[in-house]
Image (cartoon, rainbow, N blue to C red):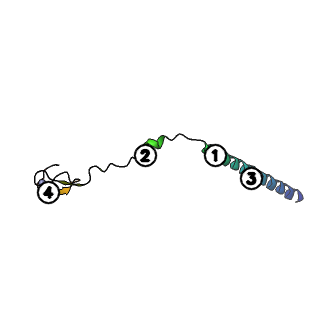
Amino acid sequence: MFEDSTSLTNILLIVSLSVNVITLLIVLRLRSNVIKKEEPVPAPNRAKVNPIKPAVDVGVVFCRNCGNQYESTEGLCPSCGTPR
Ligand SMILES: [Zn+2]
């Protein structure tokens, strides 16, 4: 009985020790990851940034045929159907 409790204590000690070691390893890994993240990384995604859409085709135009005023997004005069 005495021996059993001693071995149980030993096992508990070993387990807690190994848990400590594992925790230490995890902390060290996280630390190294943080250090790695601080290194300058090339950004290939920079070209993906969309430039601001040119607002050229938005506005009001007048029909060449009938002089009707309509939005340039229409493409055709809604009155007579003449393309811009
Ligand atoms: Zn028209």
Q: Amino acid at mark 1?
A: Asn
Observer-nearest of 74 and 17: 74
Q: Residues within 10 Å of mark 4 (few under 14, many from 20)?
A: few
Identify the secondary structure beneath mark 3.
helix
Disc marking residue 33: 1
Q: CA distance from mark 3 to mark 4?
A: 81 Å
Pointer 4 or 2: first along the chain: 2
The residue at which mark 3 appears reads as 19
Marks 1 & 3, CB-CB < 8 Å contact: no
Say if disc 4 is inside 8 Å of ligand 1. Answer: yes
Q: Amino acid at mark 3?
A: Val
Counting from the top left corner in percent of width and height, residue 50 is at 40, 47
Counting from the top left corner in percent of width and height, residue 10 is at 83, 54
In the image, what residue occupies the spot 67% across and 47% down? 31
In the image, what residue occupies the spot 69% across and 49% down? 26
Q: Residues within 10 Å of mark 1 (few under 14, many from 20)?
A: few
Marks 4 & 2, CB-CB < 8 Å contact: no
Identify the secondary structure beneath mark 4.
loop
The residue at which mark 4 appears reads as 68
Identify the secondary structure beneath mark 2.
loop
Pointer 3 or 4: first along the chain: 3
In the image, what residue occupies the spot 70% across and 50% down? 27
The residue at which mark 2 appears reads as 49
